[in-house]
Amino acid sequence: MIYKDILDSLEKENRLRVIPASQHGLDLVSNDYMGLGARWEEFQKEFISRYEDAPNTSSASRLLQRYQNLHSQLEERLDSLYGKRTLLMNSGYHANTGALSALSIPGTLIVSDKLIHASMIDGIRLGHGDTARFAHNDMAMLRKILEKKASRYKSVIIAVESVYSMDGDLAPLKDLIEIKKEFANVMLYVDEAHAFGVFGERGLGLAEELGILHEIDILIVTLGKAAAGYGAFIATTETLHSYLVNCARSFIFSTALPPSIIAWNHLMIEKLLSMSKERRSLREISYWFRHEVEAITGRKCQSNSQIIPIHAGSAEKAIAMAATLRDHGIDALPIRRPTVAAGTERLRLSLSAGLTKDDLIRVLETIRLALN
């Protein structure tokens, strides 16, 4: 059977995925960057007392749903934070596939960084516009594409992530804005999934930290990572908000998130906004840890964030490194093809504001052992 043959091939190449059992070691796997998820029990009583009447089901899409007060209130709060119209989506995947497929219509060119997330790639593929790609963070190449092609289209969308999920490096957002301004028909689409909660005085993302929120046309923000909730939202113009309500299929044809989930998102965002001290702490330990990793590996770390890759060079080595860490009570999973290119297999370490320096010293000692 062809499916079994594919599975056998994946296993032979050390690329067969399985759902891991519950993990109980030091967490370097999840995207709980601010440590809110690990503290969920601490917030349970407050949540129940404030939102005891929030239903656990919505039973319909937003366009048909009866109970929408909490959804609307959360969108209004996000509107005021971002100075844009926001639209709740069921996940970051729903947001990217829905928005990019809806925006990618005939007469549109989407120019994307080669390292954008799979959800963005899938959204572009589902659309009917033209596409082009530029080498990662290569602004000269991007400009050449736009100079050659932008005038042929009614609309051009540059699609990037602010913090890239596998290398932890940052998009040059200010440079992207300057390039955008050179062309009358160009918009900037930025996925802030791994920046929300971590960057910016209020944790609104890298665009907030750089003071350029108003310059970005479409922001995608997930609530399932640093915010320790579920779902995502799109922040954009009034016109594009209305367009997505009418044309984003993942919004129109998905059952809405239950009000109880939206209520939890309310509470988590409230907590997140006040975590300036934790954001500074995470920044400091990430900076220190990256330099310690460089000293151990002898390799320049491209990361400028809380996401830190430890390159293995092969799937087999990445699996072996993860096993060594697991044996020492540290959860860190291997990242393999097709998530990353062949030869760049790695451990992807996600740091959290809940980690201590002693925790990370233990991690570094184990990494040194795993590399020997």
Image (cartoon, rainbow, N blue to C red):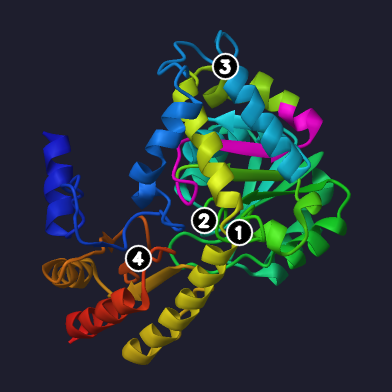
Toward the viewer: 9 or 289? 289
- Dividing the picture into quadrants, the one containing residue 238 is top right
SS at mark 1 in the image: loop
| Residue under numbered circle 2 | 194
Mark before the other along the chain sequence, 3 or 4: 3
Residue 348: assigned label = 4
Mark before the other along the chain sequence, 2 or 4: 2
Mark before the other along the chain sequence, 2 or 3: 3
Query: Disc 2 and disc 3: Cα gap in Å?
Result: 26 Å
Query: Disc 2 and disc 4: Cα gap in Å?
Result: 13 Å
Quadrant the C terminus occupies: bottom left
Residue beneath the point at 75% across and 53% down: 213
| For residue 216, side relative to residue 67 (left or right) | right
Residue neighbourhood size for the residue with mark 1, other residues' Cα within 10 Å, grouped as few (<14), some (14–19), many (≥20): many
| Pointer 4 with pointer 1, Cβ within 8 A | no
Quadrant the N terminus occupies: top left
Query: Disc 3 and disc 4: Cα gap in Å?
Result: 36 Å
Residue beneath the point at 42% across and 16% down: 57
In percent of width and height, residue 44 lies at 38, 36
In percent of width and height, residue 51 lies at 49, 25
Mark before the other along the chain sequence, 4 or 1: 1
Toward the viewer: 234 or 49? 49
Asked whether residue 105 appears in the rendered view, the answer is: no
The type of residue carrying mark 3 is Arg
- Decide: is 173 above or below 117: below
| Residue under numbered circle 1 | 162
| Residue under numbered circle 3 | 62
Mark before the other along the chain sequence, 2 or 1: 1
Please give the range of residues in magenta: 225-241
The type of residue carrying mark 1 is Ser
